[in-house]
Amino acid sequence: ESIKSDFSFLSDSLVQEHFVDLNSYLLSGGHIEKSDFYPYQLLLEYWDELYNYYESLYQIKLSKGTNGDYYYLDFFEFGSGKLSNAKRHKELTDKQLVIGLVLLRLYLDKEFDNDKTITWADLMHEFFEGEDSKLYKKAFFSEVREHYSDPEIEKFRMWFDKILNSFEKMGWIDKINKIQGEGIQFTIRESIQRLALIYEKEIENFDEFIDRYHNYSQSK
């Protein structure tokens, strides 16, 4: 069967209407969930065709989350496909990975809650009063101490917010429009669970991972 006939699904009206958005989002590293209604429906209805499309053109794998509740592009075991070009694919930076694992832990704490909204007040409590506050301080600040100045907190907030913006583009969170006085608010999406598959070792040895990150960041 020819490549042309394999891709004949692209002429279907539903595909023509939503494929461009779906394709650009997946290729940029995004994750698609049920809340992304039309792209999600497209993946449900044209799973075989889309799987073949990405395998044939990009040598990358269209993948599902553990429970089939989100979709993303991944590499086959035998190679990194055409997205290996640095302009097309970027791995998480060290800072992104630290924040990502923190958000994964927060997500798992709220796994059975209907509302997975996280506020800046929640984060401040977790980072400065939670059981792992010493680890978080070690990761986010140059030294561990009881109190930090307002400028230090504001610098951290701006840094954290910048990483949240990158995570929103990946489809791992949804930022909520700010209400006056509320500051940062966002919901963590189910697709954040992908980090549990990729970074199992770091999660199981979280304190050691933070120590290594702290030592590395201090040496730069």
Image (cartoon, grey):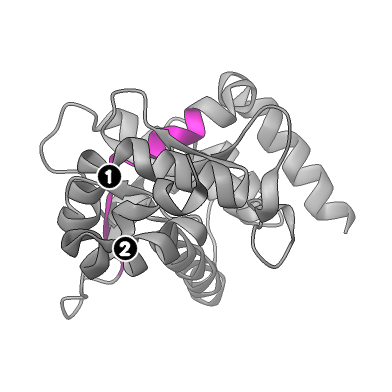
Residue 182 is marked as none
Q: Is 96 colored magenta in this rendering?
A: no
Q: SS at mark 2?
A: helix
Please state the horizontal and vertical placement of residue 131, each as a whole percent of the image. Answer: 44, 30
Farthest-out residue, front: 1
**Could you tell whether 205 is left or right of 50 in the image?**
right
Q: Residue at x 28, y 72 (%)?
A: 183
Residue 43, label in figure: 1
Q: Magenta residues?
A: 184-196
In front of the other: 34 or 80: 80
| Dot placed on the residue nearer the N-terminal end, 2 or 1 | 2
Q: Position of residue 170 (x, y in %)?
A: 44, 57
> Of the residues shown, which amino acid type is indicated by label 2?
Phe
Q: Is residue 191 magenta?
A: yes
Residue shown at 50%/55% (left/top)? 29
Q: Is residue 71 left or right of residue 114?
A: right
User: What residue does disc 2 label?
Assistant: 19
